[in-house]
Amino acid sequence: MSKNRVPAIEGWLTMDEDNPQLLGYLDESSGTYFFPKDVSISHAPGHVDAELKEVALSNRGKLWSYTTNHYKPPEPYVAPDPFEPYTVAAVELNDERMVVLGQLADGVDPANIEVGMEMQLVLGKLYEDEENEYMVWKWKPVAAEGN
Amino acid sequence: MSKNDVAILGAGMHEWGKWGRNFAEYGVAAIKDAIKEADVDWKDVDFIVGGDTMRNGYPGYVAGATFAKAMGWTGIPIASCYAACATGAQAIDIARTRILSGMADVVVVAGADTTPKGFLAPNKGERGFDPDWLRFRLLGATNPTYFGLWAQRRMDLYGATEKDFAHVKMKNSRHGISNPNARFKKIYTEEEVLASPFVSQPLRLFDICATSDGGAALVITSMDYAKKKGIKNPVRISGVSTISPTFPQTVIDMPDFTTDSAAGISAPDRSFRDSIAYAAYEEAGLGPEDMDLAEVYDLSSALELDWYENIGLCKPGEAEGLLRDGATEIGGRIPVNPSGGLGCFGEAVPAQAIAQVCELTWQLRGSAGERQVEGAKAGITANQGLFGHGSSVLCTR
């Protein structure tokens, strides 16, 4: 029986399988976006009284850089046993002009990506337990297969 | 001489290592050496600033008091501060400000750390509100992950190679070999560095700095006090930068998930890292062309190359050329990390930015021994602390 796919963190992303998006915040008075909402005010200087509106962020951008971790990180990362290397990608969102970190989608070989490449957001499994698969956002090249 | 100059009369360090003892021991050893070198008595010290350590319990959070008590209470006012890797620069700035305001003449600045094994990790417990905890949980974004991102970008943008990174490590190992305070005294070969396992690819184990135990201290005084002691030409602190970023900060940095958005407000002309040393140059009225040496924060060997550009030694994309030409080796045009840098020390967080200034002090005095940069008259340190802390100290003589 297949497990439930639940977000690894509540309220950070839509669970739309085909077109997932990160849930960010817009301060319309300065035209500035934020993700995630760490405190409930705009960080644009002089705009602390601006209202923050929840918005779904664009899910396309350009690869800013990437790195593959070959050592198991400390807790609270939940690493598979045996540990498998994973790649962290930094992608600059086209519309929001902000770089967002995310793991590279499963099945994408980091040898085949390079800075400047067009990337898209997908849902991917971070870890699982007996009942659930815990999902996060991941990045994959627009042209590539696999998630 | 600028009206904002203060004098460094003494520097002291406890050897870096993995000793596992009480951090205060290292701090006090460094203070004893610094006041001896300054030829002042502990009872003459009228202010002390301690750089805090977050991993040594309550005494670490009140490091100024911990050191003052260990040296013997004399009733002086104390300060403690924390700014991650930039702690030392902030402590130096507090000392300098106190002196320049006329409220102190002889100030001790000290920092020391005892570090655990392995990756630095966030605080324990379920901390879903803490971005530092969440970056480990949701991304597995260790500190070297960020170093790896910056390094890979250099490769894709500027054609840096793994060999270039190895050559930074090799250079620094040649510098640090004769430094009695360095932890790793071994000259590395290209084969050894390139054979070490990947941590955050393209960075390998020997490209990434370790965490260390260590302690560093300075005795900083007013120029008048130095003069009264008959010291005509002391090493001077001519600029200190403890700046923070200007919004929007568009280079991804620990411990963040994202950069600031530049959609509404344009990014500043100078990136945060470019602005750190710039502020110290401006204060001192000097520029990169006036420097004889630099101590920069090589958290990774690749990051040292970024710093060459950030502190204005060359234009973006030219750092590999500077390295390959030998310009940043002792004997070259502008030696970088003559102490051996973090590659030879590993990081003892609250002590490290002070240790950088200890090296400048000895270099400008001409007492750095085998690693002496001939005729050094001016030098700069640069470093950046987690959560937006710039750190740069410019010294002259």
Image (spheres, coloured by chain):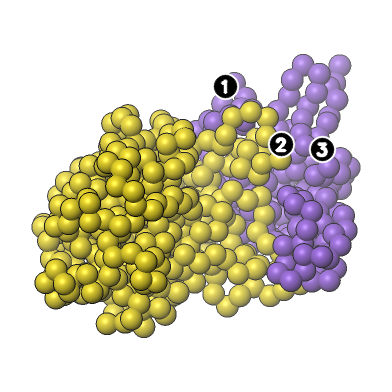
Chain colours: A purple, B yellow
Check disc 2: other Cα within 10 Å, few if <14, some if 14-19, many if 20+: few
Is B55 situated left or right of B165 in this image?
A: right
The reply to whether residue B96 is in sight is no
- Type of residue at label 3? Glu
Q: Chain of mark 1?
A: A
Mark 1: which secondary structure? loop
Check disc 3: other Cα within 10 Å, few if <14, some if 14-19, many if 20+: few
Above or below for A147 versus B307: above
Above or below for A133 versus B192: above
Residue in view at x 22 percent, y 50 percent: B42
- Type of residue at label 2? Gly
Residue B128, labelled with which disc? Answer: 2
Q: Position of residue B135 (x, y in %)?
A: 63, 42
Is A96 situated left or right of B332 in this image?
A: right
Q: Nearer the viewer, residue B154 or A142?
A: B154
Do the numbered discs 3 and 1 sit on residues whose CB atoms are within 8 Å?
no
Residue in view at x 51 percent, y 59 percent: B389
Mark 2: which secondary structure? loop
Marks 3 and 1, how far apart at CA: 28 Å
How many marks are shown on the rendered structure? 3
Q: Position of residue B204 (x, y in %)?
A: 41, 43
Residue A10, labelled with which disc? Answer: 3
Mark 3: which secondary structure? loop
- Type of residue at label 1? Pro
The reply to whether residue B228 is in sight is yes
Residue A82, labelled with which disc? Answer: 1
Residue in view at x 47 percent, y 35 percent: B58
Is B147 situated left or right of B20 in this image?
A: right
Between circles 2 and 3, the one closer to the viewer is: 2
Q: Chain of mark 3?
A: A
| Extreme residue toward the front, this view | B75
